[in-house]
Each structure stands twice: as structure tokens, then as C-alpha cells.
Image (cartoon, helix red, strand yellow):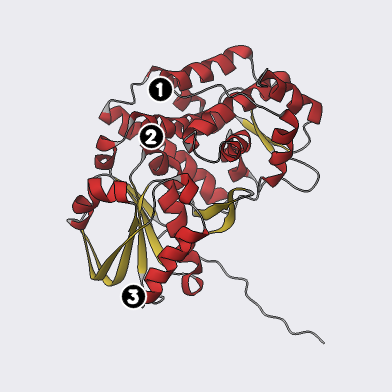
Amino acid sequence: MQVDIPLKKVIDNSYSITIDMLPQIHFDHKVAIITNPKVAGLHLGYLLSKISAKELYIITVADGEEYKNQQSIDTILESLFNHRFNRKSLLIAFGGGVIGDMSGYAASIYQRGIDFIQIPTTLLSQVDASVGGKTGMNNQYGKNLIGAFHQPKAVYIDPHFLTTLPSREFAAGVAEIVKMAVTFNKEFFEFLESADLKNPKILQEAIKQAVQTKADVVSKDEKEHGLRAALNYGHTFGHVIENETQYKKFLHGEAVAIGMIMANETAVKMNLMSENEANRIQALLQKYDLPTTYLIKNTHTFYETFFLDKKSSDSSITFIIPVGIGDVRIADTIDKNTIMHVLNKFKES
């Protein structure tokens, strides 16, 4: 005996990304702005001058990657329950990647899913984290190991928020821009080599190109079954670095920058990238004072931590390896000796 449930259908999750001054927006339902004290202190007044709703609430959670956890998610959910949010209600993620990921995850699980929009306030979240629908939180085993794919209804990228961004946060965003260029767009990389991203007009163009690159990839592979995994260039190594340093020493973009250097070393070892190309990438990262070195205390422990990565399986690790500049390979059959050779280059003596 068999009963079929025919659920095959096309769900349109399309949305627009606006790169410009935030427009006036009104909502006819309950809205909660999820933010942290730092962003609220700097920019909440500006946002409130642009946003109106039937009922509008502010929910603040602690600032920092180490607070991207279940306790913060519970804080958001409890506030939504207390204010009797329903399935027509909406969340606004107002902050960097941590706020965006947690807001999106809370939206994905509250009453089995409500809408949210992204208003990112850091360069990193504007060019990467706010686009593509990845949401989640960290736990003791690693970064973003709990989460869901939940696309926002819209993304508003307003350069105004970058005027107060600290230099380290700005550089962390540049790392993600470089990542897009190395993996998918050689011409974009060459543009970045000569560009001054501290020029607002040039920066806006770089944001546009980075967002367009990611949007093209996400539209072809929304849930990271293949091509989209290439956007994790630098992340397999970088996530281990973040885990080892308990998310306190490096910003996400800084850890990714080091991870890209490690991935480049792997590519050079595999004859997929020339030393000159690896040096050009390193020089571009160093142009914005991004870290490119890391001292590994125990290479065996570092290697074993790779298996906690979402892209890895029980017996193999998936690495994103650049093929020159402008192309990339998703590899899950790299010999352990090759990876250990690279890790030993970074080993603490």
C-alpha cells in the first residue's frame, strides 16, 4: 500500500538588492528590528527616520561572533512571542553578518518561518553575508553548523552605514570582495589591484560587482549543492582558525584572508596556481592591512577540525582551491600529505 504526496512545485524566492540611500518603507504589520547596541547607538535614529510600521519593536542582542549562539536566538524568539508576532509579521536584520545570520535563522524557525529583510551595516555583510539566504548560529563544534537556507524578501545596501565603520571591519569586508574576484572574475581582480576602495564612488562600484557575482552564483545553486560552494574559498581553513581562537582574535574576514593564503599555498603545491598569482593575491590583501599569517600549534588537531566543516563528509574534506585568478576547483580528493605540507608551513616552531 502506498500513498503519494505530490509536492513538486516551483517556489519563487526572487528578491531585489538595492544599492543606494535607504528609501522610505512602510509595513502594514508588526515589525521587529534586530540589532546590537553598537549599531543602534550609531544608526538606529537614521533607520527609524526611514521605517514605519503598524507596530515596531527593537530587539537588541550582544555584539560579537561569540554571541552568535542559542542564547541570543532565544532572546529574539522570546521577544517575538511576548509581542505576539504571527506569520504575517516581519524581522529586519540591522547590523553585520552576525545579526543577519541570527535574524534570518530566527525568522526561519519562528512559527515555521516568517519573512525578513536585510539592512546590512558592514562592508562584509553588504557584499556577502546579507545575500543568498544562509542563516544560522555557532556552537562548540564550529561555525554556522546550525542553520537554514531562508531567503530575505529584500536587501537594502546603504553606503551611509559605512561612514562609521572601523578600519578593521572595512578590511574584513574587502577580504570577501577579493574572494569573489579570485574565484569568479579575473577582470574584477585586476580592477581591485589598482582601485582605491576608500574612494566612495569606487567602493560602490566594487560592492555592485561583488554582489552581482554572488547573486549570479546563488541563482544557479541556491542551496550549495555544487557551484555555490566555491564561494567558500578561504573559509575551510578560516573556520578552523576562528574555532581555534574562539572567535575572539580575528574578525571573520580576517580569518578568511588567512584561509585564502593557505588555500593558495595548496593550489601552488598542486600546480594550479603560480607563485606570482599567489603573491598578487597576498599583496592585495596586505594593501588593506589584512593578516596573512597564522601560527598553527598542532597541525594534527587543525587537520581533524576540518571534518566539522559542513562541506566535508565522514571520510573526505572538501577544499575550495583557486585555479589561477578567476577560476576555482571544488576538491574532495586532495591527499592528506599535501594538506599537511601546507599546514606545516604555518606551524608554530
Whether residue 291 is visible to the viewer of this picture, yes or no, is: yes
Q: Is residue 206 above or below residue 289?
A: below
**Residue 229 % position (x, y):** 61, 43
| Residue at mark 3 | 83
Asked whether, in this view, residue 228 is left or right of residue 344, the answer is left
Q: CA distance from mark 1 to mark 3?
A: 44 Å
**Residue 96 % position (x, y):** 39, 46
In terms of image quadrants, where is residue 262? top right
Residue at 39% across / 62% down in the picture? Answer: 116
| Residue at mark 1 | 288
Q: Give the structural element (helix, strand or loop) at label 1.
A: loop
Instruction: Give the camera-side residue of 305 and 227.
Output: 305
Residue at 71% across / 29% down in the picture? Answer: 298
**Residue farthest along the top direction in this orientation:** 276
Q: Give the structural element (helix, strand or loop) at label 2.
A: helix
Q: Which is nearer the N-term, disc 2 or disc 3?
A: 3
Mark nearer the viewer, 1 or 2: 2
Asked whether, in this view, residue 37 is left or right of residue 140, the answer is left
Amino acid at the residue labelled 3: His
**Residue 134 % position (x, y):** 52, 53
Amino acid at the residue labelled 1: Tyr
Q: Which is nearer the N-term, disc 1 or disc 2?
A: 2
Q: In the rendered view of the protein, which quadrant contains the N terminus?
A: bottom right
